[in-house]
């Protein structure tokens, strides 16, 4: 069990021990990064798939989304947008802001057509 008495700082270890500890840390870090990359690739494969549910597909078409743009990524984006608008979910709004910002942190102007979601948001704003 680790405690103050049996911990040895790196500056009091031999060069060989420091190198071995560093090597083990680098190996663990590389394995973790590889696992993250693999998971990210799996998620991208799933997100690139077409929407399977006919009802869901039709609801996206009714929102005015072009048919060629309808995939699981769009489905997730619409779900996030609906959560922000209908529930007023602050975390969803922050996520949308993070997604629509460029690398410099500047929000990208996104034109949103008047649809049911936008009208819903305007209605909620008038009530406040």
Image (spheres, rainbow, N blue to C red):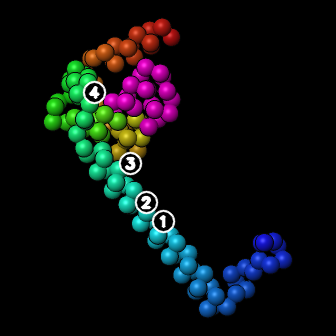
Gap between marks 2 and 3 measured at Cα: 25 Å
Please identify the dominant SS of the magenta region. helix
Q: Nearer the viewer, mark 3 or mark 4?
A: 4
Residue in view at x 28 percent, y 27 percent: 56
Q: Is residue 81 magenta?
A: yes
Q: Taking 51 as reference, is 37 left or right? A: right
Q: Residues within 10 Å of mark 2 (few under 14, many from 20)?
A: few
Q: Is there any visible trace of residue 41 in the rendered image?
A: yes
Q: Which residue is mark 4?
A: 56
Q: Taking 92 as reference, is 45 left or right? A: left
SS at circle 3:
loop
Q: Do the residues under discs 1 and 2 have CB atoms within 8 angstroms?
A: yes
State the image coordinates of residue 101 (x, y, percent, origin top left): 37, 41
State the image coordinates of residue 123 (x, y, percent, origin top left): 40, 10
Decide: is 80 above or below 45. above
- Depth check: give the residue in front, 107 or 34: 34
Answer with mark 2 or mark 4, whichever residue precedes in sequence: 2
Answer with mark 3 or mark 1, whichever residue precedes in sequence: 1
Gap between marks 2 and 4 measured at Cα: 30 Å
Gap between marks 3 and 1 measured at Cα: 28 Å
Q: Which residue is mark 2?
A: 36
Q: Which residue is mark 1?
A: 32
Q: Nearer the viewer, mark 2 or mark 4?
A: 4
Residue in view at x 84 percent, y 77 percent: 5
Q: Which residue is mark 3?
A: 104
Gap between marks 1 and 4 measured at Cα: 36 Å
Range covered by the magenta-colored residues = 77-95
């Amino acid at each position: 069990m680790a405690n103050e008495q049996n911990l040895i700082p790196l500056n009091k270890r031999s060069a060989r021990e420091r190198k071995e500890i560093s090597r083990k840390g680098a190996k663990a870090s590389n394995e973790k990064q590889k696992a993250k990359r693999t998971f990210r690739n799996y998620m991208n494969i799933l997100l690139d798939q077409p929407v399977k549910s006919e009802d869901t597909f039709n609801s996206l078409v009714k929102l005015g989304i072009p048919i060629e743009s309808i995939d699981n990524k769009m489905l997730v984006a619409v779900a996030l947008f609906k959560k922000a608008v209908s529930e007023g979910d602050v975390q969803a709004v922050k996520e949308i802001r993070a997604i629509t910002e460029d690398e410099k942190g500047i929000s990208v102007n996104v034109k949103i057509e008047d649809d049911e979601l936008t009208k819903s948001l305007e209605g909620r704003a008038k009530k406040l």
